[in-house]
Structure formats: C-alpha cells, structure tokens
Amino acid sequence: MTVKKLVSNWLKQAQCELAEETYQVSLTLEDAAKIDALAEMYPRRTKEQIISELVSAALAELEESFPYIQGSRVISTDEDGDPVYEDVGPTPMFLEKTKENLQKHKLKQSA
C-alpha cells in the first residue's frame, strides 16, 4: 500500500461516526472459519474490524446492485432533452429508510 492510499484510508476511518449500538450475529461455521482465516492472514486487523469492513463493502455493493425500475412520472430531462423517469425500484426506498435510520442513530448518540 502506498502512503497516499494509507492516508486516504486513515481519513475515511477518522471521518466516519461509529454507531453506539452494536449488533451480535451468529455466523455459520464456514463463515466463522473464513473470518478466522482473514484475521490470521491480516493480523493487524481484529475480527471485529474485518466483519465491520465486510458488512460496509457488502452494503455498498448491495445498494449498487438494486435495479432501476422506470416509473411513469418524468422527474427531469437529460442534456439531450429526453425525459428522465423516476425510479420506482428498491433504491429510493432504501435511501429514504437509510436516511431515516441515520437520523435515529444520531439522535440516540446526542442524547
């Protein structure tokens, strides 16, 4: 890893807020063995850090995988003047629910 990437990684981690709420999960034996293997391969990462980073990566990838489903309502036009239709797929609901829950977590932390 280059110093530039290292600093970038540190900045990302320093800027993110951690939720006070923790989540306890039970892993399959196979997944637990994979986490253990990763912790052995990367001894400077704790199992908790590995799990947290995997969850973050999986959620980002999940969000990107949601399909765009064209609705009937035109919400704007593109640079060529063609209509842009609203997305009635899961993305808008996921983003709205994420925003709502983020506010709830922030309120809990400030209380």
Image (cartoon, rainbow, N blue to C red):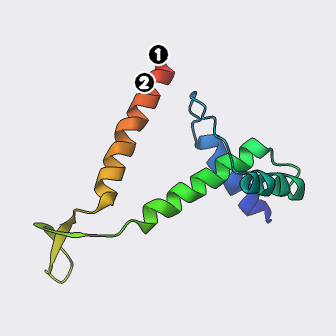
Q: Nearer the viewer, residue 78 or 93?
A: 93
On residue 14, which mark appears?
none
Q: CA distance from mark 2 to mark 1?
A: 6 Å
Q: Is residue 111 above or below residue 43?
A: above
Q: Nearer the viewer, residue 52 or 11?
A: 52
Q: Quadrant of residue 40?
A: bottom right
The answer to whether residue 63 shows anywhere in this view is yes
Q: Position of residue 103 (x, y in %)?
A: 39, 33
Using residue 9 as the reference point, say whether residue 100 is left or right of it. Answer: left
Q: Position of residue 67 (x, y in %)?
A: 35, 69
Q: Position of residue 97 (x, y in %)?
A: 34, 43
The residue singled out by tag 1 in the image is 111
How many C-alpha atoms fall within 10 Å of the one at disc 2: few (<14), some, or many (≥20)? few
Secondary structure, mark 1, is loop
Who's the residue at 81% across and 57% down the image? 38
Secondary structure, mark 2, is helix
Using residue 93 as the reference point, say whether residue 70 is left or right of it. Answer: left
Q: Is residue 24 above or below residue 72?
A: above
Instruction: Identify the image quadrant of the N terminus.
Output: bottom right
Who's the residue at 15% across and 68% down the image? 76
- Badge 2 vs badge 1, beta-carbon distance below 8 Å: yes
Amino acid at pointer 2: Leu
Farthest residue to the bottom: give it.
80
Amino acid at pointer 1: Ala
Who's the residue at 84% across and 57% down the image? 37
Q: Position of residue 53 (x, y in %)?
A: 66, 51
Who's the residue at 40% across and 36% down the image? 101
The answer to whether residue 11 shows anywhere in this view is no
The residue singled out by tag 2 in the image is 107
